[in-house]
Amino acid sequence: MFRTSRIAAVAALAVSALALSACAPTAPEPSASASGGGGAGAASNETLTIATTTDVVNYNPLIGNSRSDYWITNLMYPHLLSIADDGSKEPQVATEWGYVDETTGFYEIRDDLTWSDGEKLTAEDVAWTMNAVKRDAPSGTFYGQLANFESAEAVSDTRVEITLTTADSSIVDEIGFWGNVVPKHVFEPAGSVAEFANDGSAGGWVSAGPYLLTDVQVGQSYTLERVEDYPLVEGGTPYSAEVVYRVFPDVNTEILALQSGEVDVIANSLPPAQVETLRNTPGIEVEEAVGLGYAHMTYNMTKPDLAKLEVRKALAHSVDYEAIRKVVLQDQAVSTGSSPLMPVLEDYYDDSIEEYEFDTDMARELMEEAGYTADAGGNFPVSFRLIYSLQDAVTSQWVTLVKDGAAEAGITIELQGTERNTYLAQTNAGDFDIYAGNFAIMDDPVTNMTLAYLPEGAINYTYVDDPELNELITTASSTTDKDEKVELMREAAAIVRDNVYDNIMYTQNLYFAHSDKWTGFVSKPSELLSIVNPISVASAHLK
């Protein structure tokens, strides 16, 4: 799971080990192998310049939690698996993956990848990375996937087997997709992977991706040079000799830079209001990426007022969701029915779960049921602080509508928009009443709910601990019967919706702009991957 606004500003909380199931599932069939993405043919001396609005916070991909962290470190530290538009997994470093039995998973990896210092990338790097993350518990999404992971072993140069503490039918896919592979020979001498800055101060970086970071100008630019041998693209060599990420203060400045030819690509998604304008702007092309995430608000139940279900329901019924999707999202978003199971996940989506009704009179009644009395002006004696990132242009617009709707219901909301890194720190610390933001990729319902709703889930920002919900999620984790898993997840989604453990507002496809001089981009789901995923960046070329 990852958040669009921050690529997952995940807390440093460990995901608790799930309870053992009474019945072990049958081992799933291994996934078939497939080849890498397309390429541009002959390499060039060109520079591809990409705009971003944030600096890198962490150069260590095992603890990164910012979009720019992810975009840049992904060009150096590959993943075992990629992802398709429907959330299914595709080969990257791994060519085959699956289960030997209910508590043993495996990956077969490519034998033609080399670190930029000449060392071969082998199964030992993969196994060491997984074991180090489990041991050191870095505060990132990778660690959040390892609840049922015990250990990994390189049983040959190209095969890794993982031992699980209990049956988990999602873990092989999710570790493969979310976890980067790092070079053992570089990271092991540094000690704890949770503390290793990997900031290049010890002689630079080492890459097994298409590019290698070579120069950093904080607040200005990040320069990466081509790795000549990269077999995941056509021809085996990335097209552009150099990739430069340039930092701009906001998306409007990025758009001006794209129009002037100062940059070739904008990494972050376009504000909905700009999509049609840029589609009709000479010299610019707009690409669409499937949305596998959602925008949401969570209510911090460690706060006494928000621990009351009636108050959370009142807040949920004070939001005009349709207006947000129509006015702010320009009809580029759809409802999920206030459910964490999105329509794009066709097998799981349940259209009987209905969206919270926008009804400020109902919200007032609920506040009164919760024991609050409005003053002469119709306002209740409560105030909630809602945090959001100022760099998130869409959220920055709809939080104002959230505040206005709450005011109609007599509830005061104080908006606190901050610079992204401050917002991430507040989120991690639970320093908020209401959190507003996005998850970029919610691809597997069982894993998503494990992280978001189990007591020590790494992105459990509501701080929910519901025994019935916990049981549904843990049972679903251990079954490989698809029909049973779907039913369990639908029951869990209904509990989340009915108890307002999460207020899912919409899901949307995203749009990205680049110069029409460039082509060959490979679009992947979400803002995290979009057209700046490694295969795409390495494949993009001049027309």
Image: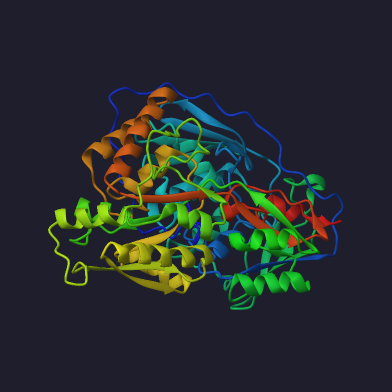
Quarter location, residue 136:
bottom left
Q: How far across and down, in percent of the image, does residue 172 sit?
A: 49, 36
Q: How is the image coloured?
A: rainbow
Q: How far across and down, in percent of the image, does residue 197 sit?
A: 49, 68
Q: How far across and down, in percent of the image, does residue 6 sit?
A: 49, 62
Residue at the (35%, 47%) spot, across then down: 356
Quarter location, residue 446:
top left
- Residue in front for this viewpoint, 323 or 458: 323
- Residue in front for this viewpoint, 464 or 410: 410
Query: From the viewer's perspective, is 356 left or right of 244?
Result: left
| Count of numbered circles on the image | 0
Q: In the rendered image, is residue 430 in sight?
A: no
Query: From the viewer's perspective, is 149 left or right of 463?
Result: right
Q: In the rendered image, is residue 403 in sight?
A: yes
Query: From the viewer's perspective, is 178 left or right of 483?
Result: right
- Residue in front for this viewpoint, 56 or 76: 56
- Above or below residue 52? Residue 115 is above
Quarter containing the C terminus: bottom right
- Residue in front for this viewpoint, 347 or 191: 347
Q: How far across and down, in percent of the image, does residue 295 sit?
A: 46, 54
Residue at the (47%, 41%) spot, across then down: 342
Query: From the viewer's perspective, is 150 left or right of 245?
Result: left
